[in-house]
């Protein structure tokens, strides 16, 4: 087969819609007679709801109804069903939706929410996860033991522990005894927001026949359908989920969100369509964000650098609901030191409830957390060993076919190569070459790198399917369930279809709106899984379609199907291409001159499920958690201003063993976008809470996200291509791994520049400056002296 | 009922009744059916709602609809008539578009920049786009697209 499109840099196939403004997102969906929903949210972090008085609100012209938690006695969630539709009996954070106002106009709804009076009886709140673990701590979910949960998770009823994951490999105490050098440190990552540009929104229409139609900004239409059915007790066959264009997701739109609320309201108000669209402030305060992460990590090595033991304790400050974060705690736990060959590993990873904004998945899913703690630890170990951090990493990274991972999995032979990634990024930033010192004595240059990995943290039985329909004119409908919110997976899949069927890529139609009624199933669009899992399903569907085509053509051309090939819109006899029949004569059935016809419409069907993955052992965490590991490395050069604490990334490079770059442009989009998102999280982002649990910065002027002027002028993307045999054309996913190693890379470069260890994110000027003052007071004094004689140019 | 305003919207004279407190963003999206202009924050911090008012970029989420009375307004839908404008084409070809939600606002800003400066430097482009948030692309391909569009002698972009 000729590869005309695979490996080619093509823009995403739905870009035209986006540059012309015709792309319709859920925000843009409007149905006749549609009502608007606005949320009344809690002003208390933890309180019993005594009374809700909506009488004044209902007097506002246009207000149709005010609904409360009493109207919706359901628990929702993906892994642990700990969420409510609206607060039931008590509120668990400031921002917790307490009531929903439904009105004919948004203006009426907005006016009315201020008139809903809620009486609270305050309960003692707990904001610190370490406090929440104490015996006397207030219990946020007294009914934790009654919630529905997936088998892989172990909430501890009667406590605030939403999940406890344990990993035990080898004998960690023995490992530390063998070590010559041990470093032990604490780490922290704050709550951050995904900041997808489209806030969450949903339009729902509950019909009188019991059918529910939902348009949603969710990442994974089939997960919404399944979880709604499970949580509300509605037959799945009654639910249709439409996914129009989605304005970014980054994990924050995975699972289930506002769909049950909107659907149930639609029914309550007399089967009218309703729309809920979050404001940006609500997105920060009432919708889930990434959890806060606390870690203690101890790592031991021989004098020569060989790692002997790693022990970690992770506490995930999961906020008021942890239905998704329980799996983040699991993924953080099983990925600790995943990229290294360490004989003895021990990790406890706990998701802990607090009275703060609920939390959920975010790009990287536990891996940015473990990478932050481990890659900073390795850097400090290198420092302690007085060893080149690159050399230390090269010596210890896993080797395909040989190493056993932290979960006890012997890595497959074609798993990829972290050494090549490290070497590539080191070369890109001239690792080891001393850089010229800046003229200003208060500015310092440093370089840092990190190595890491990511695979899909999905349940072992997460499945995907694909349908390929071929139309009369040999246009092809690619019908997969994987969502498209910026990654471009559908474009890559279309490239595969075009090459396999020998048709121009323009003839492959990717759907700009997915509907669970028409496209093939996929579990979720998360975890960098789409290209691998849906890609494998597409390959099987193509094989199926081609088999059908060849069967018909073999009768027409009177040769065996095996002697045929499909090329340039024709089915031809191998070696005698002039003996052929156009695909257009086959795809709807072939008709002989006398009218007799054979075959029929060609519809290919394929599926994928992992035959390898296992549940992890509940005691030891041993097993096979993922279908691939995408190994990667990042490196950067920074400039640190010791007077202000400002860190500026001057240049950066990232390399990933992605097996095969199906579309190098989309790879570069991911790597550049991922780097900047990682840079933003490393340098700027932190959701700040006051002592009463209120979010202090729920907007883009006080919660800073990297802007065009904040980016380095050079970000190198280096694909490393060691194909994996069970992957489509060898390709592994890269949607998440591209951002997860950026924070430790930058912090390692800062350490290299000024000898200051920063283990708490973000590296804002304030935090960096404080750390310099604490760890290197002499440096500040020295520079002050130099400043006296500094000749300022005016 | 409100007050009747009239203005040129994407080259066509339009009349609409608006309330004194109605925002241009909502009027465009809900009354004129032009949903290409996006809501990202509602308080002028993300740039997704940018439109051209008398040729200058304004944040439609902070502009009262009354203020456009008698003026000329261009939204993303007003750019491509028969075929894509150069700036739209370079955005598409360079891969400056991922989820696409910030794209209309940034393309409008790019048009405004190129109108005032035919050949901006990369730094000037980044500085000019400071008010527009994009969470997907890291801005690299956006800056590239604008640079490439600027290189073309183009009166219309």
Image (cartoon, coloured by chain):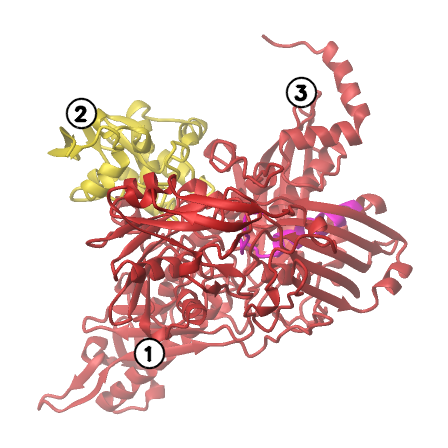
Chain colours: A red, B yellow
Mark 2 neighbour density, 10 Å: few (under 14) some (14–19) many (20 or more) = some
Q: Is residue A365 magenta?
A: yes
Which quadrant of the rendered structure holds the C terminus of chain A? top right
Instruction: Say whether residue B54 is visible.
Output: no
Where residue B71 is drawn, which disc sits there? 2
Q: CA distance from mark 2 to mark 3?
A: 52 Å
Q: Secondary structure at mark 2?
A: loop
Determine which residue is flagged by label 3. Answer: A439
Q: Position of residue A246 (x, y in %)?
A: 37, 53
Dots 1 and 3: beta carbons under 8 Å? no
Part of the protein shown in magenta: A356-380
Numbered disc in front, either 1 or 3 = 1
Determine which residue is flagged by label 1. Answer: A604
A604 w.r.t. A657: above or below: below
Residue farthest to the left, as pictured: A594
Where residue A419 is drawn, which disc sits there? none
């Amino acid at each position: 087969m000729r590869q005309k499109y695979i490996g080619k840099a093509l823009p995403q196939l739905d870009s035209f819609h986006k540059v012309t403004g015709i792309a319709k997102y859920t925000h843009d969906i409007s149905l006749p007679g549609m009502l608007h929903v606005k949320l009344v949210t809690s002003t208390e972090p933890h309180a019993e709801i005594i009374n809700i008085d909506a009488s004044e609100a209902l007097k506002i012209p246009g207000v149709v109804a005010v609904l409360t938690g009493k109207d919706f006695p359901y628990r929702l969630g993906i892994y642990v069903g700990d969420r409510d539709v609206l607060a039931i009996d008590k509120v668990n954070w400031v921002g917790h939706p307490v009531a929903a106002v439904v009105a004919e106009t948004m203006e009426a709804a907005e006016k009315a929410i201020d008139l809903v009076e809620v009486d609270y009886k305050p309960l003692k709140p707990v904001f610190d996860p370490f406090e929440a673990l104490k015996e006397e701590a207030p219990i946020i979910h007294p009914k934790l033991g009654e919630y529905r949960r997936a088998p892989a998770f172990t909430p501890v009823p009667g406590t605030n522990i939403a999940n406890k994951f344990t990993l035990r490999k080898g004998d960690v105490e023995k490992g530390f005894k063998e070590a010559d050098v041990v470093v032990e440190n604490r780490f922290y990552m704050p709550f951050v927001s995904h900041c997808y540009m489209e806030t969450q929104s949903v339009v729902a229409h509950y019909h009188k026949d019991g059918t529910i139609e939902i348009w949603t900004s969710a990442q994974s239409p089939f997960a919404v359908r399944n979880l709604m059915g499970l949580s509300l007790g509605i037959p799945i066959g009654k639910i249709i989920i439409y996914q129009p264009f989605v304005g970014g997701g980054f994990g924050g739109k995975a699972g289930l969100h506002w769909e049950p609320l909107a659907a149930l309201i639609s029914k309550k108000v007399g089967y009218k369509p309703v729309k809920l669209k979050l404001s940006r402030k609500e997105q920060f305060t009432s919708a889930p964000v990434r959890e806060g992460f606390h870690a203690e990590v101890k790592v031991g090595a021989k004098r020569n650098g060989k790692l002997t033991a790693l022990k970690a304790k992770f506490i995930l400050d999961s906020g008021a609901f942890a239905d998704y974060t329980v799996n983040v705690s699991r993924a953080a736990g099983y990925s600790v030191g995943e990229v290294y060959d360490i004989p003895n590993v021990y990790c406890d990873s706990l998701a802990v409830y607090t009275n703060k904004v609920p939390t959920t998945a975010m790009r990287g899913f536990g891996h940015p957390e473990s990478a932050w703690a481990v890659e900073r630890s390795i850097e400090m170990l290198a420092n302690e060993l007085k060893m080149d951090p690159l050399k230390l990493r090269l010596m210890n990274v896993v080797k395909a076919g040989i190493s056993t991972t932290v979960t006890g999995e012997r890595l497959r032979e074609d798993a990829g190569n972290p050494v090549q990634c490290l070497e590539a990024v080191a070369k890109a930033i001239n690792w080891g070459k001393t850089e010229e010192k800046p003229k200003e004595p208060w500015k310092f240059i440093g370089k840092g790198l990190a190595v890491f990995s990511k695979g899909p943290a999905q349940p072992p039985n997460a499945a995907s399917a694909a349908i390929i329909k071929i139309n009369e004119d040999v246009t092809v409908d690619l019908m997969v369930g994987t969502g498209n919110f910026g990654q471009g997976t559908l474009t890559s899949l279309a490239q595969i279809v075009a090459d396999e069927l020998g048709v121009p890529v323009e003839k492959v139609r990717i759907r700009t709106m997915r509907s669970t009624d028409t496209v093939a199933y996929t579990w979720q669009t998360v975890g960098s899984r789409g290209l691998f899992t849906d890609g494998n399903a597409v390959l099987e569907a193509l094989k199926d379609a081609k088999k059908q085509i060849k069967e018909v053509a073999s009768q027409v051309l009177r040769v065996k199907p095996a002697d045929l090939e499909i090329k340039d819109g024709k089915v031809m006899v191998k070696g005698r291409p002039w003996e052929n029949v156009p695909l257009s004569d086959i795809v709807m059935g072939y008709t002989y001159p006398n009218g007799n016809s054979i075959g029929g419409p060609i519809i290919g069907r394929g599926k994928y499920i992992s035959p390898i993955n296992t549940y992890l052992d509940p005691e030891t965490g041993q097993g096979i958690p993922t279908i691939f590991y995408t190994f990667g490395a990042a490196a950067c050069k920074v400039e640190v201003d010791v007077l202000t604490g400002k860190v500026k990334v001057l240049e950066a490079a990232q390399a990933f063993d992605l097996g095969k770059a199906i579309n190098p442009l989309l790879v570069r989009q991911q790597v550049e976008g991922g780097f900047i998102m990682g840079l933003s999280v490393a340098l700027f982002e932190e959701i700040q809470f006051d002592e009463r649990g209120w979010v202090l910065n729920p907007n883009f002027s006080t919660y800073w996200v990297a802007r065009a002027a904040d980016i380095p002028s050079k970000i190198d993307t280096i694909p490393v291509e060691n194909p994996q045999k069970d992957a489509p054309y060898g390709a592994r996913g890269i949607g998440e791994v591209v951002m997860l190693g950026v924070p430790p890379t930058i912090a390692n470069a800062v350490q290299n520049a000024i000898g200051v260890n920063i283990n708490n994110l973000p590296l804002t000027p304030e935090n960096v400056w404080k750390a310099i003052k604490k760890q290197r007071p002499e440096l500040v004094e020295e520079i002050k002296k130099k400043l006296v004689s500094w000749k300022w140019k005016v | 009922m409100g007050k009747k305003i009239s203005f040129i919207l994407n080259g066509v004279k339009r009349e609409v009744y608006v309330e004194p407190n109605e925002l241009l963003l909502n009027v465009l999206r809900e009354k004129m059916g032009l949903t290409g202009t996006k809501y990202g924050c509602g308080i002028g911090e993300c740039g997704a709602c940018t439109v051209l008012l008398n040729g200058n970029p304004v944040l439609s989420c902070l502009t009262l609809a009354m203020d456009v009375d008698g003026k000329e307004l261009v939204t993303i839908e007003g750019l491509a008539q028969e075929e894509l404008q150069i700036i739209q084409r370079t955005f598409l070809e360079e891969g400056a578009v991922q989820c696409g939600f910030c794209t209309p606002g940034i393309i409008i800003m790019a048009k405004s920049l190129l109108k005032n400066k035919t050949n901006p430097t990369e730094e000037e482009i980044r500085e000019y786009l400071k008010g527009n948030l994009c969470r997907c692309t890291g801005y690299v391909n956006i800056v590239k697209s604008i640079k490439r569009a600027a290189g073309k002698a183009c009166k219309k972009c």
